[in-house]
Amino acid sequence: MSRVAVVGAAGMLGSDLLAALAAPGSRSEPGSLSEAQPSRRGESKGFTRADFDVSDVDAAREALAGFDVIVNCTAWNRVDDAETMEAEAFAVNADGPASLAAAAAATGARLIHVSTDYVFDGTATSPIAEDAPRHPVSAYGRSKAAGEERAIAGNPGATAIVRTAWLYGEHGPSFPRTMLRLAAERETVSVVTDQIGQPTWTGDLAEQLVRLIEAGVPAGIYHGTNSGAVSWHGFARETFRLAGLDPERVLPTDSGAFVRPAPRPAYSVLGHDAWVRIGLAPMRPWQEALAAAFEAGALPR
């Protein structure tokens, strides 16, 4: 039986992962993050930034001693701010994984590090393979790419990188929630059609991470996104439809209407072959996941 540490447990993904790991019935009553909770494979415990600084190697080693699996869900994800605060982004997104990898290596633990599609430049035209070269074009992307490299180097042969994208869930701000808020404030919303990706429910990603843990965390790079592809515009329309709103209220536009400090990948569709190689099914289509998130109450109607 494994002892699983979830770092970044107060975030959108970390919260869902703790719930997925815990015993049946605990999704609505997960208990204290600081207390070990019974799980499918032993015990799970959540850690937040109040417990230790992920960039502090000694603090990480002390806090995470005795765990068999460490899952890093923490991140500096203020993409635009990172353009002028790159050192701060690197402290969490690069130094943090290095510290956690050192903590894992010290006790022989497996490490799962959650990364992002921003490690690529977004110029692909077909699903991006797990072994495609990293080529980040933003400060945030550079920090996350460095985090992947340091996690693997610091705990060689025992680290799994799980890249995800377009996350939404119950426990934090997200694109669907923004769309539903705007729908209550105005008659129409304009959303870009020229950025393509894979909306991913944190509930589904959490379950996939549990499957990876149950499989023994085979080392490698995996793409943890719901299947399929859609533009932000299409994602917004489906969100409206499932919420009982008229999708025609979502108007098309392009990225030129929303100039931001950090460049956004135009194409963030990730391939899922690595799951098949270890005997696990890729995550279900994004449409099914979005409908399930509404049904589960993770998104408001």
Image: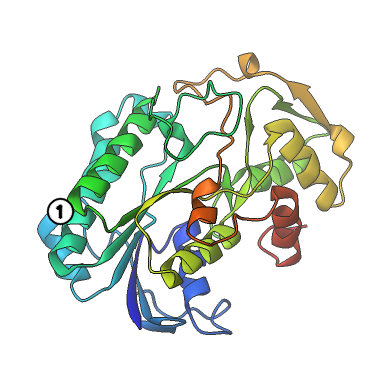
Observer able to see residue 119 = yes
Q: Element at badge 1?
A: loop
User: Which one is in front, 209 or 33?
Assistant: 209
**Quarter in which the C terminus is drawn:** bottom right
- Mark 1 is surrounded, within 10 Å at the Cα level, by few (under 14), some (14 to 19) or many (20 or more) other residues, namely some
Residue occupying the point 51% across, 21% down: 260
Residue 145 in percent (x, y) is at 33, 35
The type of residue carrying mark 1 is: Asp
Which residue lies under the disc numbered 1? 56
User: Which one is in front, 60 or 111?
Assistant: 111
Q: Is residue 230 left or right of residue 32?
A: right
Above-or-below relation of 29 to 156 = below
User: Which one is in front, 201 or 51?
Assistant: 201
Observer able to see residue 170 = no
Way the structure is coloured? rainbow
Q: Is residue 223 left or right of residue 201?
A: left
Which quarter of the picture shows residue 149?
top left
Residue occupying the point 13% across, 55% down: 57
Above-or-below relation of 36 to 130 = below
Which quarter of the picture shows residue 238?
top right
Residue 96 in percent (x, y) is at 24, 49
Q: Is residue 240 left or right of residue 208?
A: right
**Quarter in which the N terminus is drawn:** bottom left
Q: Residue furthest top?
A: 256
Residue 206 in percent (x, y) is at 52, 63
Above-or-below relation of 47 to 290 = below
Residue occupying the point 59% across, 54% down: 282
The number of discs equals 1
Residue 161 in percent (x, y) is at 38, 50
User: Which one is in front, 285 or 54?
Assistant: 285
